[in-house]
Amino acid sequence: MLMLFRWLLRIVTALLAVTIAGALLIYYVAGGSLPDYDDRRTVEGLSAPVEIVRDTGNVPHVFGGRDADVYFGLGYAHAQDRLWQMTMLRRTAQGRLSEIFGARTVKLDELMRRLDLYSLAAASVPAQDDQTRIALEAYARGVNEWISVVNAESRGRGAPEFFLFEPEIAYWQPADSLAILKLIGVQLSSHLSTEVLRARLSLLSRDWPRDLMPAAPGGGVMELPDFAQLVPGVPASGAAVRHADLGPFSPFPDRGLEGASNAWAAAPERAAAGGSLLASDPHLGFSAPALWYLARLELASGGVIGGTIPGVPAVLVGRNAGLGWGLTSSYADDQDLLIEELNPADATEYRTPQGWEPFRSRRVIVNVKDAAPVTLTLRWTENGPVLPGGHYDIGSVTPGGHVAALAWTLLDANDTSMTAAIRLMTSQSIDEGIAAGELVVAPSQNLVLADQDGVAMVTVGRLPARDAAHETQGRMPALGWKPQNRWTGRLPYDGNPRVVDPEGGILGNTNNKTIDRPFPDHVSFDWGDSQRIQRWQRLMQEREVHSRESFIAAQLDTTSPAARSLLPLVAADLWFTGEAAPAGTPEARRERALALLAEWNGEMNEHLPEPLIYAAWMRALQHRLIQDELGPLATSFARMEPLFIERVFRNAEGAGRWCDILQSSPVESCTDIARLSLDDALLDLTERYGPNVESWRWGDAHQATHDHPVLGEVPVLKWFVNIRQSTSGGDFTLMRGMTAGEGPQPYLNVHGAGYRGVYNFADPDSSVFIISTGQSGHPLSRWYDDLSELWRRGEYLPMSLDPGLARAAATGVTVLEPMTAPAE
């Protein structure tokens, strides 16, 4: 027995030693890709020395003799910290993920190839102005310099992920940056999925789109005909929406997770310190690392600082000494799905107003790791690329003998949006900023501006011109061979929504409806917000003058206007009714929950139980309202639709009929459904968090999911690469924290402000900003998640253009010197 014990001890000791040695070896190898920020190098491609000063938040401040050298330095810094992220963004846009991930990303690669984003980006390079082409080329040289350092010095292949997947790191090209900018446009798209879903609802009932997908309040919309009348041959189906599995790198948003954002500004007369104020927090899906990267560039026009996206040589949201800018998704209707009829005698042709025409076709090969390559035939019509039926379930609204093509402003081979971004950085006034915005093609955004003297907001991006006789007004798919359904050009930039120096001194946008113009001069029928705008208006009107602190407070506000308006409606006949229930019964738990909600002010605070009770109740309520009518299609409405619930409980246009369960004999009232759904919610929460209602916490369920898109699903590794945090806020709060809506953890926070900035032109160097993770994409770096706790607590970093402050507490200084001394 003693001998057996000794051998077991030796075996366990040996295994532990091997495990520890293996872990140390992995750490040593992976750690080799951590960059040394205190470095001096002689490099090719520079005309003068470049200095990259890393401040205490690891924000690089890039100084150089010429603008091209500064862009070189930014490319070098981006590649040092985010090389894996950059290459994955590029591969996604190129449709080349399957070369390293195998079959699981084939569907995404096929879809990206059909959109042909990378070819369009390459074709757009000559369309940029000289300054932008210089920036793109210099930036690419900077990225490639770091790749050369990695290759020459065995610097851990540049990032730990490269050891696991062994991809070739191709050198950077100017087209790569343009392709990434287009990829961001994909993340912000929304109208394609909305058109398909509205058409499916219309096939089931003409009234259902009006209730479940109502137009934003503030203006009438012409009645739409039934989709079945416009596109005959499509069967009505309540089947769940089928989405092709596009994998973890898919840029195509689920419904409700399209781009969102907040941005607002106050003119000097509405600011306590007498200088303009601007707040900006763009919303995207969370990831580790965040998509955003903080940087400062010292250009010939002066310093510029703010949020960049690795792979793109521009500060996309930020400020310079004289001008600040923020962006929100405009929700402009820049997509139309057109149904194209195939020639029965020749499937290589489709119907046009002039007769049958051949598709513009091209064959491409998608290489797949550990599998045979896939050959695709890409087809384009005059309206746009032909899409597969599995994308957003397009096939469910496409009759036999037809295909669907997508018209989209993003699919432009002369896209000058990058030139607009570069010009905006160097603009010194609102007028110059608005002029730069004219060059934006896609995605369409609301550009909020502030300079020393005033504020402005303008919708940038090309808006398609439609025929007044368009059969669906772009709200549902239409027949592509009918001339009235085709785009007739673009609307003039001067007609885009614009406000300069408003009389009240304050302007802003929360993705809300910006303008009410009749079709076809409208901007959109579908908007991203009808709730947050209410809270923003109240906060702005509560004070005569604002300060940096009041703008920060508004940016971090967690009060839900949806909760404050819906609870009195839904619970009106439930509060304080009947006799007290016996302790320990479901009825008693319901009474306690209602008592808590009666005293609640709508604040979605992570430490309270009320937000969790409210969110679970509204989720269960909507499910009960729509499940019997929609069946499996109800999964397309996984998140609460406040306007729908309000219509039902106000019985607007007879919407109260949704409360009756069709399959049951009794006629249920809305009060009955409210009570039953509350019991559903409380039962579910009890199973998850125990019977003590007061011990439930919103933050336990509403954790922010800053997950690594690949390693985040790997056992053990996920504990090191994913960043999970208890958070406040919710779907409809200014500090937005959009919930997952479905799955085993439906209340996870999956979408929100990855960047926040507040700029104060009374004292520009008192401006602040933050991102949701850290600057580095390397899980072993101290800078991987160091900013995430500041972000969670609502804290910020200084956003100063003072070079002395950057150097005073620098954590590293990299000096890049040219191979040959600059000519005198």
Image: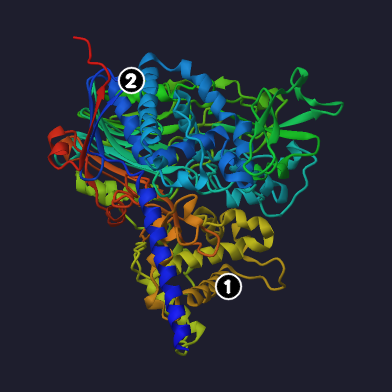
Residue farthest toward the right in the current orientation of the protein: 345
Q: Amino acid at mark 1?
A: Asp
Crowding at mark 2 (Cα within 10 Å: few <14, some 14-19, many 20+): some
Q: Give the camera-side residue of 652 and 687.
A: 687
Q: Amino acid at mark 2?
A: Gly
Residue 139 quadrant: top left
Q: Which mark is on residue 271?
A: none
**517 in relation to 818, above or below:** below
| Location of residue 220 in the rendering, given as x and y in whole percent from the top left corner | 54, 40
Q: Which mark is on residue 45?
A: 2
Q: Circle 1 sits on which residue?
A: 672
Residue 65 quadrant: top left
**332 in relation to 693, above or below:** above
| Location of residue 186 in the rendering, given as x and y in whole percent from the top left corner | 52, 37
**411 in relation to 89, above or below:** above
Q: Give the camera-side residue of 617 and 320.
A: 320
Q: How is the image coloured?
A: rainbow
Q: CA distance from mark 2 to mark 1?
A: 72 Å
Q: Would residue 576 be seen by someone viewing this image from the given angle?
A: no
User: Are the residues at dot 2 and dot 1 in contact (C-beta closer than 8 Å)?
Assistant: no
Of the numbered discs 2 and 1, the one sitting upstream in the chain is: 2
